[in-house]
Amino acid sequence: MFRLWARIFENNHMLQDICIADDSSDTRTHKIFHALEEVCYQFDLAKPIWLDKNIADFKRLSKTRFTSDNFIEHIEFDFLEIQIIEED
């Protein structure tokens, strides 16, 4: 089972969170992108742009933060954080 936890923060307070589970046989990368797509749909957000910093953080920690620099549209929060909490 693969699970990704996504949280929206503003002023160091969590406003929303969601956990996306995926038990398909896709690759890890596909599971991450599908989960992020579902998170953006549930939170009514545009998909964030993966910058080099996000990729490096995610490879090292299985966790990254998307700030306003990662979104084309204006966001009403400080950052969106995603983290893998379970992998098969």
Image (spheres, grey):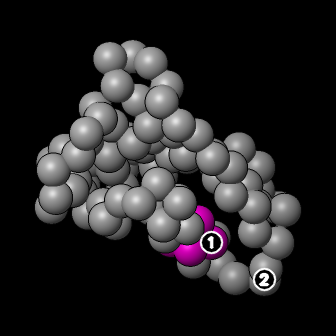
Q: Position of residue 60 (x, y in %)?
A: 48, 44
Q: Is residue 16 visible?
A: yes
Observer-nearest residue: 42 or 30? Answer: 42
What residue did someone put label 1 on?
31
Q: Which circle's residue, 1 or 2, is located before the other in the chain? A: 2
Q: Secondary structure at mark 1?
A: helix
The amino acid pointed to by label 1 is Lys
Q: Position of residue 52 (x, y in %)?
A: 24, 55
Observer-nearest residue: 32 or 76? Answer: 76
Q: Position of residue 7 (x, y in %)?
A: 51, 39
**Residue ID at (28%, 32%):** 78
Looking at the image, residue 62 sits to the left or right of residue 3; the answer is left
Disc 2 crowd rating (10 Å Cα; few below 14, some 14-19, many 20+) is few
Observer-nearest residue: 79 or 52? Answer: 79
Numbered range of the magenta stretch: 31-36
**Residue ID at (48%, 30%):** 15
The amino acid pointed to by label 2 is Ser
What residue did someone put label 2 on?
25
Tell me which secondary structure the magenta stretch mostly adopts.
helix
Give the quadrant of the C terminus: bottom right
Give the quadrant of the N terminus: bottom right
Please say whether residue 27 is one of the residues in the magenta stretch: no
